[in-house]
Image (spheres, rainbow, N blue to C red):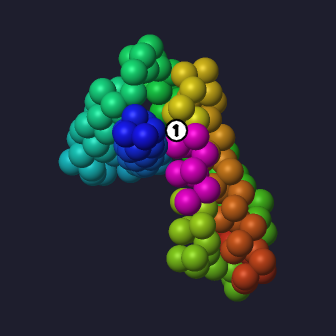
Amino acid sequence: MRSLRTRRRRTAVEWLAAALTAAASLWLAVGLFGARDRPALLVFSVAAVVAAATLFFRVGSGRERAAVSLLAGILLASGAVFGALIVFIVAGSCHDDGHIGWYAWTLGGLVSLGIGTWSLHGARRTWWGLPAAVLAGAVVVSLVATLATGSTGACLE
């Protein structure tokens, strides 16, 4: 019975470490666009990813080979931010009454975090799972904002 309890605790710690790594990785991917204006934010973001990934790789056994996939996932997720901006603009339709409320950002962030955490549990899914998490979160934010206010309010003007 003790080994089952230990296994459950270890699994919970692995999922927590994966969630921290996913959160730090997605934060870094989004934060790369503001890095020019805030270099301290970039340094903090990189340090957070390194710390979370170190914990994740230490807790999980045999996950060291996933480091390259994690790096590729972060880089591709940075590119997926442009796709997220396109989703916001398309859902915005230049309406002045549109607004993205905190509830939309929260729900979209949770969706991104969930998909990102899940993707870290397989080395082959990390490189495409993190960008998918960014895009899925953007779609959820846009859907919730559109359903609540009629649009996101985003426009190219």
The image quadrant that residue 110 belongs to is bottom right
The stretch drawn in magenta includes residue 49: no
Give me the residue at 39% from left, 21% from top: 61
From what the image shows, is residue 39 above or below residue 125?
below
Point out residue 39 in the picture as x, y percentages from the top left corner. Answer: 24, 45
The image quadrant that residue 3 belongs to is top left
- Name the residue tied to disc 1: 78
From what the image shows, is residue 149 above or below residue 78?
below
Depth check: 106 or 153 in front?
Answer: 106
Point out residue 155 in the picture as x, y percentages from the top left corner. Answer: 68, 66
Q: Is residue 46 left or right of residue 24?
A: left
Magenta span of residues: 110-118
Q: Is residue 43 left or right of residue 25?
A: left
Depth check: 49 or 151 in front?
Answer: 49
Point out residue 77 in the picture as x, y percentages from the top left corner. Answer: 55, 37
Please rate how many residues cluster around mark 1, counting C-alpha atoms within 10 Å: few if below 14, some from 14 to 19, many from 20.
many
